[in-house]
Amino acid sequence: MSSNHLLIESDKEHETLDRSSASNFFSGSLSTPSSRQSSPRMEPSRFLKKMKRKGEKAWYKRKRVKSLVGVIGLICFFFVVNWFMLVRLQYHGRKTNAFVNSSSVSVKKELKKFGKGKRSQYGVYGRMLALAAHALAEGQNKREPKDLWREPVVPASAWMPCADQRNWEPSGGNNGYILVTANGGMNQQRVAICNAVVLARLLNATLVVPKFMYSSVWRDVSQFSDIYQEEHFINYLTPDIRMVKELPNKLQSLDLEAIGSVVTDVDIPKESKPSFYLKNILPILLRNGVVHLLGFGNRLAFDPIPFQLQRLRCRCNFHALQFAPKIQETGALLLRRLRKHEGHSGPLDHYLVGPYADSIMKEKRGQSAKASRYLAIHLRFEIDMVAHSLCEFGGGEEERQELEKYREIHFPALAHLKKTTKLPSPAEIRSEGLCPLTPEEAVLMLAALGFNRKTHVFVAGAQIYGGTRRLGALNSLYPYLVTKENLLSATELEPFKNFSSQLAALDFIGCTAANAFAMTDSGSQLSSLVSGYRIYYGGGKMPTIRPNKRRLAAIFVKNSTIEWKVFEQRVRKAVRQTKHIQSRSKGRSVYRYPRCKECMCPTD
């Protein structure tokens, strides 16, 4: 047999053997136990374990694949949701930006429209007003600064009213009678009344209920009982001084001027000390039995003065003087409408409108109703203030001539002084902070402080110099702006028509009860009295904005170049520095700064 044949046969045997082994291996699972034991090649338990492990691995792989697919699907789902939300936000952002831009553009258009009038109406603040309009439109959904509507409560509430406490016997008023005719408007008259009460006690005199001088500026014939409750005034101060409504008949027939009993404000230096009255007025009183202080006003110093006399001053202002019922009733109606008829009373309502404070609660809408808070601002920008300040307000030669004519009629002494004496220039006066804020400057201050466009603003004041058009910028930037003339009907205001002092009393109520009050002129008597009243009865919860006009003047002078953010920061800093709570310093008014031991008592 050849070698090739032997190789082929060997291959066939190996092939047959391999097939037989394979057949026996795969048939092992069906073999009997004896056959499995006799055949060392067939091990079913090891095979099953191996197959089981392979099955588990396959199942685990399938599970991992499914989990991976699920995770990928979840990630895709999140991507889809995020894409959808992003599209919505972009769409909403475009709408918001469009609204903001349209609001800003509309305000700017209004300002541009107003700018077409006389330059004197808006001064030099066109650029700043446009920036303010844009800032208000962009920030109308932002939160306002927290300190806008509150005082530093802890130090502010550390004082409580105590001017009603007495520590002396009633005065007999044996040295004669004091007649007082107070000059000025309602607020100047209020100061004169309380100064007269102190003089009556100092001189041991009987005070005749003060009368009010007719003024060519105010043109008001109101007398004491038209504005205040006369009976309450007399009765409340009876433990302090003796008071009567009229002079005795025997003294009424005397020619007081002829006997030298008439003393005018020219005869009494401003803020005279008590010693002046003891030396110069008491002898007249003892000699003639009566003295008439004509044109009496701010003629008594705040320091030095005995403790109890200073407390009497506060007692008169904060307790004895209460508005007449018709003013209280209309004042309560004004407050109800300022608060949008929510039926919530404020902490000062009872002191301002007396029993009519209860009527504010009648229109209560339910326990869940929230009172509508409002900001009050006193624009002391009437023509008398503008003319007396000797400042200029951007009106050019026409304005200068108009104010000069007004001074010659109503302030002849000032007009003469201006012609015969070299006075500081209007720019120098402004740099010293002695000019009243214009309506444009006031609205820029409010916007810089952070009051948003939705703020409800109550504007107090009489006839604004320049008319209602001068309020154009204020109206445009703060559309929720109202005055007593807007809130009260012509019928409701009819009893007060042509009585500027009584109308001023309504402004006093609206400003004093406000959630926040902004002054624009520190020399204003109304602002001084309102801020003092809010301190005395507010319990540290009635913030007042007292701008430092000297610092504001330094900021406003850069109106043509300053950026809004810088302007905003500087105004806030200038106003924040005036919010520090401190006791009255020597020589300052107790009507404006009642935090002193004579008027208020420390709680600690």
Image: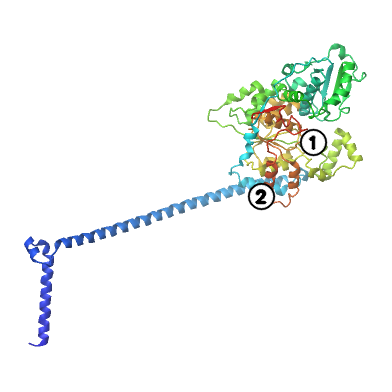
Judge left or right: residue 400 versus residue 522: right
- Depth check: 281 or 456 in front? 281
Query: Is 84 rendered above or below residue 501?
Result: below
What residue is disc 1 on? 385
Crowding at mark 2 (Cα within 10 Å: few <14, some 14-19, many 20+):
few
Residue 255 in picture, x, y percent from top left: 91, 17
Q: Quadrant of residue 213?
A: top right
Judge left or right: residue 215 versus residue 527: right
Crowding at mark 1 (Cα within 10 Å: few <14, some 14-19, many 20+):
some
Nearer to us: label 2 or label 1:
2
Which element type, helix, strand or loop, lies under badge 2?
A: helix
- Depth check: 334 or 592 in front? 592
For image coordinates 76% across by 48% down, the residue present is 557
Q: Quadrant of residue 328?
A: top right
Can residue 35 be spotted in the picture? yes
Q: CA distance from mark 2 to mark 1?
A: 32 Å
Residue 452 in picture, x, y percent from top left: 62, 42
* On-image quarter of the C terminus: top right
What residue is disc 2 on? 565
Which comes sooner in the sequence, label 2 or label 1? 1
Q: Residue furthest top?
A: 250
